[in-house]
Image: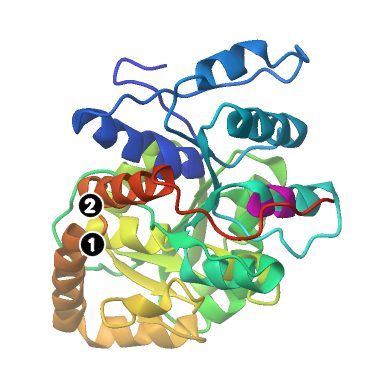
Amino acid sequence: MTPAGVHSVLASYRYRMLIPLGVLKQRGHEVKIIAQNPDTGRLDSAIEQLRGADAVIFAKNDLWNVNESLLAAARQLNVATVADFCDDYFGNRDRRGEHYLVMAMRADAISVSTPFLARRIAEETSREATVIVDPYEGPRGVAKWAPGRQLRALWFGHHVNFPGLQKSLDVILSAGIPMHLVVMTMNRPDIVQWCGANSAPARDCAVEFREWSLEAMWRALHDCDVVLLPIDRAHPYYLSKGHIRVVESLWAGRFVIANSVPAYENFGAWAWIGDDIAAGLRWSVEHPSEVVARINHAQKHILATFSPQTIAKSWEKFLKSVRRGRRSSAASWEP
C-alpha cells in the first residue's frame, strides 16, 4: 500500500488488475482484491469474501492449489468465475501447465491479454477466450528524436526477457552507431556483470545498468533517444507476450525498434518492427522527421485504444456478460 493506493512492481498485476479496477471503482462498481496467504492452509476468509460477489477474476499468481479450491468454492456460491491469462504455459507438462489447463477448463469464462493467447487456448482446450488488452501507464511524453554524437538507447523489462538483449548486442552494434545503452531491470549480479563486461570503448559503446522502478523507468524514457526491444524468438514463451513495452515507450514520446512478435506487429506503422535491429537503427538515423511523425500518430492511436478508461469499459462489458450466464461449453475437465 502506498499513499497513491495499492501498488505492485509486477507489471501483470498493475495492467491486469490494479489499473482497470481503479477505473471500475470510479465507474461505481464495488471492487476488492482478495490476497490469500498460502502458509495458513485455510481458505475460510477468502471464501467468505467471495460470498455475494457477482464475479471473481483469478489473476496471475503461483498459488495453484489455492486458486483451484477457490474457483470450486466460487461456483458453489453461484459467483461467476473468470480465469485471466497473460502468459503461455499451456504447453508445459508440469504442475504449472496442468494448473493453467484446470483453470481454463473449469472457469465460466476466460480473458487473455493477446489474440495469440486466445488462439493458444483454443488449440489446447477448444474454448473461446475474450481478449482484453493492457492499458498504458504513466505520463504522455512529447515526441522527440534529437540524438547527439552518441545515441542514448534504453532496454527495459522483466529479467526473463534479458536473453533477447544478450543474443542481439553484436547485431545492435553492427549498425556502427555510437551508443550509450541503459539496461533497466531487476538488480541481479549476472546482469550487472554482463553490462560491465560489454561496455566496449573500442566500439564506442557504453552499457550502463540501472535498477528498475516505475519512477526510474519514466525518467529513463524521458532521457533516452530510442527504446530497443530485441526478442529471443527461439523460445515460444515470448511469442505470447503483450504489447505493453512498445506502448509505454511510444506513449512516453520515444521511438521503438523491436524484433517482431505477434503483439508488436500491429505497431509496424508507428515503430520499427523487423528481424534486423541494426537496420532499424540505421533507418531511424536517416529518417528523423518520419520518426517524430510516427510517434505522434502512435500516441493518437494509443489514446483511443489503450487508455485505462477504454480498457476498464472492456472489462465492464465482459464481466456483465459473464454474470448474465454466458458460459463456455466445456467445464468438467479433470487433470
Question: From what the image shows, is residue 64 above or below residue 107?
Answer: above
As helix, strand or loop, the secondary structure at mark 1 comes to helix
Q: Compare residues 13 and 74 and report the one nearer the observer.
A: 74
Give the x, y percent position of residue 329. 60, 60
- The type of residue carrying mark 1 is Thr
Residue 94, given in percent of the width and then of the height, sits at 86, 53
| The one of 194 and 325 positioned closer to us in this rendering | 325
Residue found 35% across the figure and 70% down from its top: 256
Where's the N terminus, which quadrant? top left
> Mark 2: few, some, or many residues within 10 Å (few <14, many ≥20)?
some
Image quarter for residue 298? bottom left
Placement of 113 over or under 44, stated as above or below: below
Query: Position of 41 compared to 214: left or right?
Result: right
Label annotation for residue 205: none
At horizontal 59% and vertical 71% (from top left) the residue drawn is 239
Span of residues in magenta: 101-105
Find out whether residue 55 is within the magenta segment: no
- Tell which of 66 and 326 is nearer to you: 326
Left or right: residue 143 compared with residue 60: left
Q: Where does the image place residue 81, in percent across and percent down from the top left? A: 54, 40
Q: Secondary structure at mark 2?
A: helix
The residue that disc 1 covers is 305
Provide residue 272's location: percent of width, then percent of height.
35, 80
Q: Are marks 2 and 1 in contact (CB under 8 Å)?
A: yes
Give the mark, 2 or 1, whose residue is nearer the N terminus.
1
Residue ID for mark 2: 310
Q: Is residue 290 above or below residue 184?
A: below
